[in-house]
Amino acid sequence: MTDDLHPFSNPGRTKLSLVSRGLALPDGLPDSSRWLAQSNSAESTLDVRLPSGHFCSVPVGQPYTEASGFSLKLGDDGMAVMSCGGETETVELVEAPAFYSKLTRKGSRMGSFASLHDRLLILQPFMGCGFFAQPDQACAYCQFDSMLNEEQPPLRDALELVEVVLAALDEREVDTVYLYNGFTPNDDVGLSRLIPVIALLRRHLGHRQIALETVAPKDVSVIDALYAAGLDIFICNLEVFDGKRFAEICPGKERQGGQDAIWHALEHANKVFRSGAVVSHLIVGLEPLESTLSGLKALIDKGIVPLLIPFRPLPGTPLQDVKIPALDDVENALLLQYHLLETSGLPTHRLRDMGRVLTPMESRVLDGEQPALSERWVISSFGRHWGGWLDGLRRHVRVGKGEKTDDRPFHRLLAAQAAPFVVMFMIVMAFAVGAISDAPEGLSSEGWQALLVFLLCLVLWVTQLLPLAVTSLLGMALLPMLGVMPASNVFALFGNPAVFFILGAFMLVAGVMQSGLSERVALGILDRVAHSPKQLLCAMLLLPALMACVMPEHAVAALFLPIAWEIVRSLGLKKGHVYAQAIFFALAWGAIIGGVTTLLGGARGPLALALSSELTGHSFSFLQWTLAALPLVIGVLSVALYLLLRMTSYVTLDLQAVRQRFTQRRLELGGLGIKGWLMAVLMSATVLAWVLAGHANTLASISLIAVVLMFALRLVEWKAIEQHVSWSVVLMYGGAIAIGKALSDTGAAMWLAHSLIPGDMVGLALVALLVLMTLFFTEGVSNAAAVAIVLPIAMPIGMAAGLDPVGVALTIGIIAGFAFMLTMGTPPNAMIYASGYLNSGSMLRYGAVLSLSAFLLFILVATYWWPVVGLSLLEVQ
């Protein structure tokens, strides 16, 4: 085959000749600004559409294009006539877009950093390439001398890029936006700066593709972030397959990690992007053809789509005198590419509308084959819209809320994403069927509806398909809608005193944390007592336990978590080290166990207080709760300390670095200051008032008065309150209390209790069953949710069996605090598990020991200690 043998007989060959050799303009081109686009500082292109429909971006005005066998003239009738070897063909010239001459809002000419070729919009977001700022580091075939080319190339305003995109869309249908990254000398080669740009473009482009050509980053995690932001096609160019030749041509890329870095980036991207969306260019003509073909095969074997680029010598580059490759070589490489891709099954439709190269889909035309029906579908308008929608769905499923992609098979991810909606639909259908069904025998219609609302909320609390607070709001909305309770009565339960007690407590804790009082106390004690690994471990258990008496357990865990990190890092402990595990276990167990001591340790106590008051009219005081819980707390803490010391019995460590870090942090914090001392006095006085006070009404009033004093003394700002107050807990309170009240008033609670618990079960056996039921629920849902689920059932059956209602409320409220085994049971568990130093097996193993200890110790404490302090469980007072 020769270059000029029947030049127009095969449109694929014609396009290949044009894009690789260019087009001569012997008579020039009248009104050239109407037709020519400048792709860089030296090379101009002319967009041509062949009679076959193939689109070509043809280089013109270069030394090598003037030697091309193809030439173009404009006829008298205004038609463009292309000739080669004595044959002619009429072609369509595509006008340069009008937006090229427009200015952005910052005064930049749009055509200076954008070019539109058919449906391919090319953007230059960076003003240059950092390789050109370093001596002898730029790629030998490249030319960016019109750019700024600083070592840290400036990034254009993202809104300017959006302006260009919108201007292009006003003129033509754009299918792909193609970004060039250039190079910035850091581990992510500047890609992190493009993440917000791509995210913004994604919001404007809908189904259209976004492609990015980049140097290989050393930090490949940025590829996940690019995909999450909205990138569809990742392009990292191998350039040539021969390693030595690569180092000669691309010294900067070789210094950046060379071909190893490129392969690593491509292979990582292939795990993130859809099949056929990871691409690498190979330049034909810069190495022996056999080497290029070997690179072609290697890329396809790894699932990467190769794109063959015929070498074109640009003036002013080190390779300007290198000859253009023989057309036969390029055609043979393209045919092999086509056959290998067809055999591999890799989709190639994403590389459409590439006017400057012969795409893999177009290569089949060289063999005289026509696109299959499936290929015509994917490049049709409807197919492109459908593909864009699928890309968005896949991204949503794989990425979720973060930037890290999930590389499990897509069908499994889709099933996992769909499962909550399917389960939710089934729950709603079951609820609807129950709502239109007759009430069971022995239960009123209102009781049946109340029971359905409770069961619906129970399932949603356990499965956590909705946030706990939202589930409670749903329950409050359904109760008046189903005629169970008047709306005024339901929503009035938000005014329960226990709600305002815990709300006030949260606000006071916010003041304690903002003043720095809690951190100073913790560091001061640790610095003084941590003289050995065992002493440090004891302190990390007992100090959080002590602080959880006056602060919510999750706040205590959040305070001590950075301290635990400092200890582990200062000691140089790696993941899996037994002492590191013990440190994290100590802070979580201390916060959990200590939080049971008073009503301030968590939401479960005030909720038990509120439910007891609403359901039975009986309640307990702050002091009664503490007296009931204290021996149990001491017992479980003793078991926890034994476990920790046994875990670390053979550990020997030098704590000098830890003590130095404690001292350094104390010096950074400085003295407590007047606000800190005032906060300490106010908190101490408030706790004393709670201990001496009576029941819920007084507790709530004391909390609110203390909060007012805190603001009056200017000890805290409202922003700190918003950060530390768990408003979701307040919302959950209202719903849980309303549902419990509805179950009690309609008789549904008594009916359900008799249905679930044998009527002849009394005494310690019934208490043990209630405790085990609470322990079971508190591992799977939050402590407060466990109380909301169990207490409305336990209260009527307990009272019917002769148990004291106050004793039942204390039992459920206290036991609900001992969640040790699973991460979802309580925030401290989730925090230490997220550290990465613990595994679920060790949490389950040690947590089971602590839960069993809590169960046995509670039975002993309730039987022998409670009567001593005036509390009774086995008979009504």
Image (cartoon, rainbow, N blue to C red):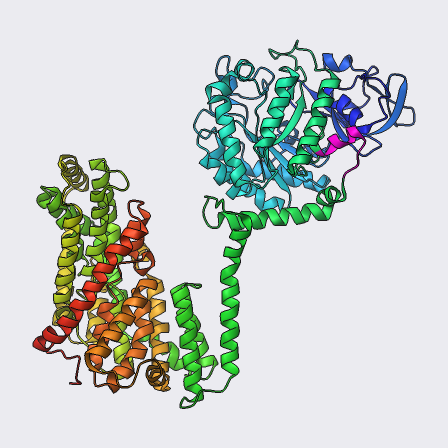
Residue 381 or 845: which is nearer the viewer?
845
Q: Which residue is outermost to the top?
A: 321
List x then y, in percent, for residue 412.
52, 52
Residue 185 or 849: which is nearer the viewer?
849
- Residue 503 in sight from this viewpoint: yes
Query: Is 680 on the left-hand or right-hand side of 568?
Result: left
* Snapshot quadrant of residue 789: bottom left
* Snapshot quadrant of residue 748: bottom left
* Snapshot quadrant of residue 575: top left
Q: Residue at x 51, y 48 (%)?
A: 398
Query: Is 328 on the left-hand or right-hand side of 124?
Result: right
List x then y, in percent, for residue 32.
77, 23
Does residue 404 sit above or below 186 in this rendering?
A: below
Any magenta on residue 591?
A: no
- Magenta residues span 361-371
Query: Is 20 on the left-hand or right-hand side of 540?
Result: right
Q: Residue at x 59, y 33 (%)?
A: 304
List x then y, in percent, for residue 752.
36, 82
- How many marks are shown on the rendered structure? 0
